[in-house]
Amino acid sequence: MDLLPHLAALAGMHLLMAMVPGPNTVVVSHFSAARSRRHGLAAMAGVVLASLLWVALSLAGIGLLLLEAGALYRLLRLLGAAYLLYVAFRLLRSALRRQDAATAPPALGWLGQRPFAAGLVTTLSNPKSAVFWTSVFAIALPAAPPAWFYAAVIAVIAVQSAFWYGLVALLLSTGLARQGYARIARWLDGLAGLAMLGLGIKLGDEVRRELALRLP
């Protein structure tokens, strides 16, 4: 059985998903531009670890179990939406209060001093990742693959996640990028806050509509 086409398909789908702007990109970008390259790479490491956890759980069938346990899945998504709304509130408040980069309050609260934890929590707050990967694996995984193929899938996703989010961290932590950030920091914090706000509302509204459909 030639498994390389299956692996290439999974790699392509993952890379495209990673490149779509979302909470992971926002948190890595924020730490890279607002703090330092080290902070950005630490946030990237948290995102990568959490991504691998969701992938491993999906391979183990947790995504399917979440779909079956509808109430639990909705609760986890509501918790994820609440976290995204919290981050949005912190970013928007920072944008409104910010005078300059040196006197700005920590935009993410206690997570603002813990970039690895911020990246980890941001990615773990989206249980839809497990369901997404379960769907992808149902399409792209070959029938009864050998054990090494699962390890290869996890390795490829780890490398690609580190590459993409690491590239974001490196580019946005350059001197030119950070100088530009310092000049328009409050506007970028506001845009990031609005992005998180939209994502949180969207996630919460999905749960609301599901519950509405269940009502008689």
Image: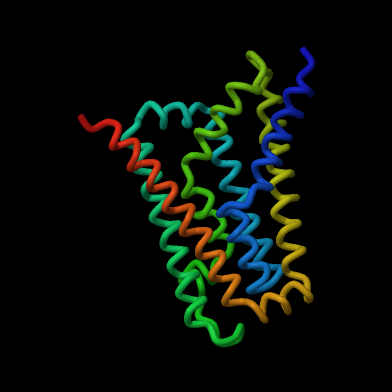
Q: Position of residue 66 (x, y in %)?
A: 41, 32
Write down the quadrant of residue 206 in the picture: top left
> What residue is shown at x 58% (from left), y 52% (from top)?
22
Residue nearest the observer in this picture, 90 or 123:
90
> What residue is shown at x 48% (from left), y 79% (from top)?
96
Q: Is residue 64 above or below residue 107?
A: above
- In the rendered image, the residue lying farthest to the left is 216
Classify the position of the N terminus by image quarter.
top right
Write down the quadrant of residue 144 in the picture: top right
> What residue is shown at x 20% (from left), y 29% (from top)?
216
Judged left or right of residue 214, residue 187 is right
Judged left or right of residue 24, residue 78 is left
> What residue is shown at x 68% (from left), y 31% (from top)?
151
Q: How is the image coloured?
A: rainbow
- Please give the count of numbered marks on the rendered protein: 0
Q: Position of residue 118 (x, y in %)?
A: 53, 60
Write down the quadrant of residue 170 in the picture: bottom right
Q: Position of residue 68 (x, y in %)?
A: 38, 26
Judged left or right of residue 171, residue 116 is left
Residue nearest the observer in this picture, 139 or 118:
139
Q: Position of residue 27 (x, y in %)?
A: 58, 61
Residue nearest the observer in this picture, 40 or 216:
216
Q: Is residue 159 above or below residue 133?
A: below
